[in-house]
Amino acid sequence: MREGGTAMDAVVQGTMVSELSAPQRSVGLGGMPDRDGIVTLDAAVMNDDGRAGSVACVRGVQHPVLLARMVMERTQHVMLVGEGAQQFARDQGVLVCEPALDAAVYAEWQAWLQQKKYAPVINVENHDTISMIAMDANARMAVASTTSGLAFKMHGRVGDSPIIGAGLFVESEVGAAVCTGLGEVVMRRVGAHAIVQMMQVGATPQQACEDFIRRMIDKVPAQQPYQVGVLAMNYKGNTGAYAVRSGFTCAIGEASGNALYAVRCCE
C-alpha cells in the first residue's frame, strides 16, 4: 500500500504469504488433509463496493485466494467449488497440480487413521485460518480469508472462510469483520455480517466483536471444545478483536510498523 497498491492488492498479497508457508499447516497446499488424505482449500475476498469472490473445496491450487479474486473480477459469479473451481483455474492459466503429502503430514494422517477419532485441538486444528482486513490511502477497504480447513474433516466439508457474510464481510462507510476458528459455529451465526451490522448501528469495532462472541456463547456454551476469534475495523481506523478463549493472536500493521498481540477473550 505504501507503493500505491489497493486494499484488495494488500489482503491478497498478505494471505498469499501464509498460503506458501503456514507452520500450523492450516493454510495452503501444505495444510492438513481430510480423512481421505486429500488437501482441499477454501478462500474468499470482498471489496467494500459489494463485489466478492470465493472458491471452496478446491484441490491443487497453490494460491486459492488469488483464484477467489479471479472469480470476483473475471466472472459473473461469487463462488466456484470443487472441480468447477479447478477447471476455472486451468482456464485462467493457473497451474493445477496434485502434490503429495509431505512426510510429516502423511505420518499424522496415518496415525489418525488408527483410531479415526475426530477431536480437533483448540487453537491448532480448528483455529489457524488466515484472515485480513485492509484500508488503503483512498479510504477503500477489502477483506480476504484462506484456509485448508479442519484437519481430518469429512471430504467436501466447507467452513465459514469462503462464505460471504460468515467468514468475512465489508460494508462501505461502516467497516469490515473477519472470523477464524470453528467454522460451523460461525456460519450458524453469520459472524462477520453480524459484527458489521452492530457497527452500523453505533457499536465500536471492539464492542461489536465482544457482543458477537458473547451472543455466540449463549447458543454454543464455551464449555464445548471450540475456539472462535473475530477481528473488525471501521473507516476511522479503529480496530477490535475478541475470542472465545485464550490463544488467539492478531497483528496490526500501520505506517509506523507492525504489532502482534494476544486477543482478549471470554475465558
Image: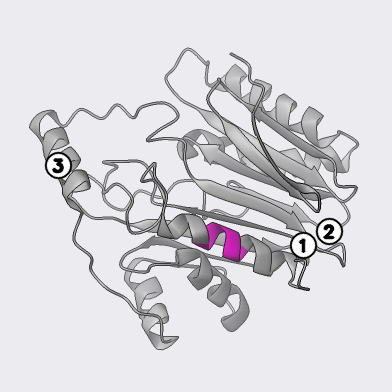
The one nearer the camera, 137 or 115, is 137
- On the rendered structure, is 161 left or right of 193? left
Residue 45 seen? no
Q: Residue furthest front?
A: 256
**Left or right of residue 209: residue 89:** left
In the rendered view, how is the structure colored?
one colour
Q: Residue at x 78, y 44 (%)?
A: 233
Residue at the (29%, 46%) spot, across then down: 32
* Residue named by callout 2: 172
In the drawing, does residue 104 fall left or right of residue 230?
Answer: left
Q: Does residue 152 sit above or below 54 in this rendering?
A: above
Q: Position of residue 27 (x, y in %)?
A: 42, 51
Q: Which image quadrant: the C terminus?
A: top right
178 over 207 or under it: above or below: below
Residue denoted by label 1: 48
Judge whether residue 15 is colored magenta: yes
Label 1 Cα neighbours within 10 Å, binned few <14 / some 14-19 / many ≥20: many
Q: Quadrant of the N terminus?
A: bottom right
Q: Amino acid at mark 1?
A: Asp
Quadrant position of residue 35: top left
Q: Position of residue 263 (x, y in %)?
A: 65, 27
Say if residue 267 shows up in the picture.
yes
Q: Position of residue 223 (x, y in %)?
A: 47, 12
- Circles 1 and 3, Cβ within 8 Å, touching? The answer is no
- The x, y position of residue 247, in whole percent, is 52, 25
Q: Is residue 139 one of those drawn in magenta? A: no
Q: Amino acid at mark 2?
A: Ser
The residue wearing badge 3 is 107
